[in-house]
Image: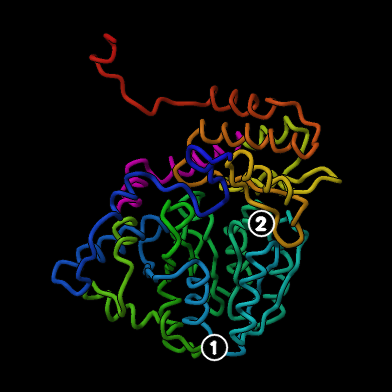
């Protein structure tokens, strides 16, 4: 009987590989979350999250939830039943956020785009100009379904240019981008930024992270959508003293502290550049296979996930099944409209060039197994050459090692 050996190559776009440092930080006995010294960890991570969101004035919140919980927190604390919001459906995750908005009782104006395209800023502009009742624009920065990194700065400029800054909020889902791709909360005038722990922060799923602008905090005082578990006011009242309104996930808080330390040590801009470089290697491989990515605009290619379209007549579900069963490789499948037509490779979390090259090798074997006529080694070679030419030393070299 064949049994799997080695670690599973987890190359979906989240949950991502967890660094050993983070796992060690989480591996601890339960602690008293009402103790006199617990505020040390609470205040520490809340302050450091400002650096992650790139904000001086925003207020971070940490919920024991996923990105979906963070979505609900952002909506329910800033809006009221019947409020009109603009949003864009460009993949499964924007679709699910739309579903939440509608179920919460918001009046949702949806712009649908071809999957693979970005945000229709001119349509958003036109609606804001003619409709003064719009209270918020809610957009996804990185649509994990299609591998599209949208232009949030452009949407923010539209809000300014239409004179709607004071009367309209900007809510951004950065679940698969914040901590991995450029995000500037203050510069882009984002009112609510949303992310989760299992993507760029390299943690298990279980923390929904929100950062609110001062404007959003003010709006929350008059918003009437119901909230209990996700109440900002309850969080603020307890966070002020270094505590939470209910039992927090203490292992994840200590893991978050370690992950934020690792990001700070590398430098956030270096983290962004690393993700960009890793994703570019995957795109070079796709080109060598004579295949294409789903994203249509190279300026909007995601740096955390590459969605790869299969040639007609080949099944992405079968590809992912074979990759997992034969090669212990987890690829992301195509979602909704892209089910069976595409597959996804994630390049976020604790990965390096060799892990990605191993992933590409496994992908090539699975592609050949389902009959796609690629040349074995072509994608690996294209990515390896790119990584070789752009590599920088990441380890020191001591005088002792020089003698070996």
The earlier-in-sequence mark between 1 and 2 is 1
Q: Residues within 10 Å of mark 2 (few under 14, many from 20)?
A: many
From mark 1 to mark 2, how far is it between C-alphas?
A: 29 Å
Residue behind mark 2 = 145
Q: Nearer the viewer, mark 1 or mark 2?
A: 2
In the displayed orientation, state which residue is furthest to the right: 313
Q: Are marks 1 and 2 in contact (CB under 8 Å)?
A: no
Q: Quadrant of residue 289?
A: top right
Residue behind mark 1 = 80
Residue 339 place in picture, x, y as percent: 74, 57
Image point 62% across, 59% down: which residue?
Answer: 154
For mark 2, give the secondary structure: loop
Q: From which residue to which does the magenta span run?
A: 257-281
Image point 65% across, 76% down: which residue?
Answer: 99
In the displayed orientation, state which residue is furthest to the front: 1
Q: What's the magenta bit mostly, secondary-structure-wise?
A: helix
């Amino acid at each position: 009987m064949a049994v799997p050996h080695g670690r599973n190559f987890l190359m979906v776009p989240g949950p991502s590989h967890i660094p050993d440092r983070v796992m060690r930080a989480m591996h601890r006995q339960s602690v008293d979350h009402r103790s006199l010294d617990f505020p040390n960890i609470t205040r520490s991570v809340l302050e450091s999250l400002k650096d992650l969101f790139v904000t001086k004035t925003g207020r971070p919140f940490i919920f024991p939830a996923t990105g979906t919980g963070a979505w609900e927190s952002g909506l329910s604390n800033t809006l009221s039943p019947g409020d009109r919001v603009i949003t864009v459906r460009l993949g499964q995750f924007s679709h699910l956020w739309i579903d939440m908005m509608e179920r919460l009782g918001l009046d949702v104006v949806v712009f649908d785009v071809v999957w693979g395209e970005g945000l229709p800023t001119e349509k958003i502009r036109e609606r804001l100009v003619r409709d003064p009742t719009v209270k918020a624009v809610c957009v996804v920065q990185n649509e994990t379904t299609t591998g599209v990194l949208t232009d949030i700065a452009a949407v923010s400029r539209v809000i300014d240019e239409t004179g709607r800054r004071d009367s309209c909020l900007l809510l951004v889902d950065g679940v698969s981008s914040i901590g991995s791709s450029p995000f500037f909360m203050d510069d882009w005038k984002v009112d609510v930024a949303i992310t989760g722990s299992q993507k760029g922060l390299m943690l298990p799923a279980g923390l929904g992270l929100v950062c609110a602008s001062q404007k959003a905090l003010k709006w929350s005082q008059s918003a009437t959508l119901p909230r209990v578990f996700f109440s900002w006011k309850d969080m603020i009242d307890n966070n002020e003293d270094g505590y939470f309104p209910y039992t927090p996930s203490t292992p994840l808080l200590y893991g978050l502290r370690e992950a934020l330390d690792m990001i700070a040590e590398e430098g956030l801009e270096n983290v962004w550049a690393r993700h960009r470089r890793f994703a570019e290697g995957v795109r070079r491989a796709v080109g060598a296979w004579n295949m294409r990515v789903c994203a249509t605009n190279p300026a909007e290619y995601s740096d955390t996930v590459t969605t790869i379209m299969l040639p007609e007549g080949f099944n992405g579900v079968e590809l992912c099944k074979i990759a997992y069963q034969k090669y212990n490789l987890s690829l992301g499948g195509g979602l909704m409209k892209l089910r069976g037509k595409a597959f996804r490779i994630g390049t976020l979390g604790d990965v390096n060039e060799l892990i990605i090259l191993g992933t590409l090798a496994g992908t090539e074997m699975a592609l050949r197994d389902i009959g796609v006529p690629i040349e074995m080694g072509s994608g690996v070679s294209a990515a390896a050459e790119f990584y070789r030419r752009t590599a920088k030393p990441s380890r020191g070299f001591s005088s002792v090692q020089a003698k070996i």
